[in-house]
Image (cartoon, rainbow, N blue to C red):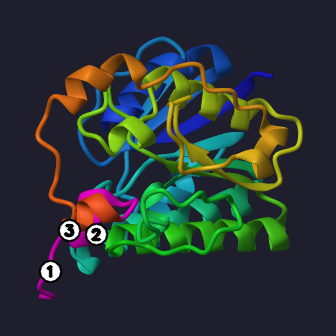
Amino acid sequence: MTVPKLLLTGAAGALGKVLRESLKPDCRVMRLSDKAAMAPARENEEVVECDLADKKAVDELVRGCDAIVHLGGVSVEKSFEEVLDGNIRGVFHIYEGARRHGCKRVVFASSNHAIGFHKQGEMLDANSLRRPDGYYGLSKSYGEDLSRFYFDRYGIETACLRIGSSFPEPKDRRMLITWLSYGDLTRLVRACLTVPKLGHTILYGASANRDKWWDNSLASHVGFEPQDSSEPFRAKVEALPPLAPDDPAAIYQGGAFVKAGPFESS
């Protein structure tokens, strides 16, 4: 299945840059958006600077698109005020645009931080209680609820990807479990774009790592099969000093996000 026109938000970010390249075979035209500067458009690309907090601009951004990969917004823990525009208003504007223009499939970059206050070692699936670990995680939890509402009322299918730690390689012991390679990120997004019937699905984004906290069996219909593993990096990571056992980052699945802040409201 090839998407005639795919919208990729957050295209200036690290994962956006990866998917800009790797999703080329999956669409005829890719519309790339961010409020930060992006590389100029190449063949079969459209580059549109857009602030997700601007509802009218987002409405025009979505016009004519057949599917959306929504990575845009704040990607780290910040104050509520900083998270509000990009992650809460922004995801609402994306779905309103999809509703207005008949776009019926969204791949939404949720996060493991929507469940970050579960203890490390707990096995979670799509039905596990959400336990956000900060304002960022709260915004992703909101996005999951919003997408469910737009599926139930308007039939817009969504994959909520609870992405773990997607970097070139894992940086610490926690990431040996939560790591998602760039190759597996692409395989995950591609599966969500191409499966004939997506519905409203929650998937955890992790590679085929030795140790696991997340179970994707309730999303087996998507057909995501990770092929990479953090195991080649184990010796390098385990040579680093471990965290103290009572450090919250060593206790909860969200890692350091559970202790970020506090942030002062303006």
- Residue 246's mark? 3
Q: Is 253 inside the magenta-drawn segment?
A: yes
Is label 3 or label 1 in front?
3
Q: Earlier in the sequence, mark 3 or mark 1?
A: 3
Q: Earlier in the sequence, mark 3 or mark 2?
A: 3
Instruction: Looking at the picture, tell me which residue is in the foreground, 266 or 210.
Output: 210
| CA distance for labels 3 and 1 | 19 Å
- Residue 262's mark? 1
Instruction: Looking at the picture, tell me which residue is in the foreground, 32 or 224.
Output: 224
- Residue 51's mark? none
Name the residue type under label 2: Val
Q: Quadrant of residue 248?
A: bottom left
Most common secondary structure along the magenta stretch: loop
| CA distance for labels 2 and 1 | 11 Å
Q: Secondary structure at mark 3?
A: loop
Q: Secondary structure at mark 2?
A: helix
Residue placed under numbered mark 2 in the picture: 258
Q: Residue furthest right?
A: 197
User: Residue at 29% of width from left, 41% of height from top?
Assistant: 173
Quadrant (top left/top right/bottom left/bottom right) for the C terminus: bottom left
Extent of the magenta region: 252-266
Quadrant (top left/top right/bottom left/bottom right) for the N terminus: top right
